Amino acid sequence: MLGNTKSPYVLDYFSGSGTTGHAVIQLNREDSEKRKYILVEQGQYFDSVTKQRIEKAICSSTWKNGKPVDIQTGISHCFKVIKLESYEDALNNLELKKPKVDLFDNNPDLKDDYLLNYMLDVESRGSLLSTDDFKKPFDYTMKIAVDSAGAFEEQKVDLVETFNYLIGLTVKHIDAQPERGFVTVTGTLPSNETCLVLWRDCEKIDYEGLNKLCDKLALNPADNEFDVVYINGDHNIPTVLTQTAEEGGETRVLKLRQIEPEFLERMFSEEEV
């Protein structure tokens, strides 16, 4: 159990059918406390068993023959399901540029070395995630395994949410308007710097559209609201404001960073063990 006594976090790394989450919900129902839970499960039964049990526990304290017995015991509750990319998912999305001529027929050891140290690194680069994918970040998909037999289907991947975790952002507010071509996320970085992350569909919001959006968000060096600003795609947003002597002679710099290199570096960086 983590956190303080008033609002602790209960962690179950092998959640199974969801007994721990069910127990936390029932305790909160009984004493009106605000305990939170984190459940981790890799079994294929998660959607059909674990998740459904949590949903039923929220709706009613008791069930009989698949129906809630006392609907008045339902509580206000919100939970988020986060699915992580598996090893098999990564393999399904690799696209290797195989040489037209097999140069290693007579040297299998050299072929294995080539596959492990060059082909999987160099010739598959960009097949999982490339800078081009950030031009339309709300449409990014991956081939996700749906059963143990190797079947998969295209599913959307939330790049916005992923980036929040990669930079360690404590999210304060999200304005999601993908139909209008943008999503903004505000929060605090581990360095305690205030941060704005601006995602845009580069086809819907071009240079001129981005400038108008930034004006609407008061995103400029004259504004001191955010210490760090992340934006995807190319842009021509001014980052420095220098005032004249009559205006005070102050120089302000907008700490502006591109999402793409930060995302890819954190996503694929190798850590020494």
Image (cartoon, grey):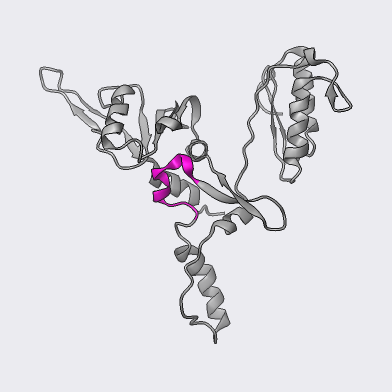
**Front residue of 180 and 169:** 180
Is residue 245 highlighted in magenta?
no
Judge from the rendering whether residue 127 lies leftward or rightward of residue 206; answer left or right. Answer: right
Q: Which residues are magenta?
A: 128-140
Residue 56 in percent (x, y) is at 77, 26
Report the magenta stretch's main SS. Answer: helix
Is residue 15 visible from the viewing direction of this image? no
Give residue 221's quadrant in the image.
top left
Q: Position of residue 140 (x, y in %)?
A: 49, 45
Give x and y (percent) for residue 92: 59, 58
In the image, 238 versus 75, the foreground residue is 75
Q: Quadrant of residue 41?
A: top right
| Residue in the foreground of this view, choosing between 77 and 164 | 77
Image quarter where the N terminus lies is top right
Verify whether residue 130 appears in magenta. Answer: yes
| Side of 168 relative to 244 (left or right) | right
| Quadrant of the frame with the C terminus | bottom right
Can you name the residue that lies furthest to the bottom here? Answer: 106
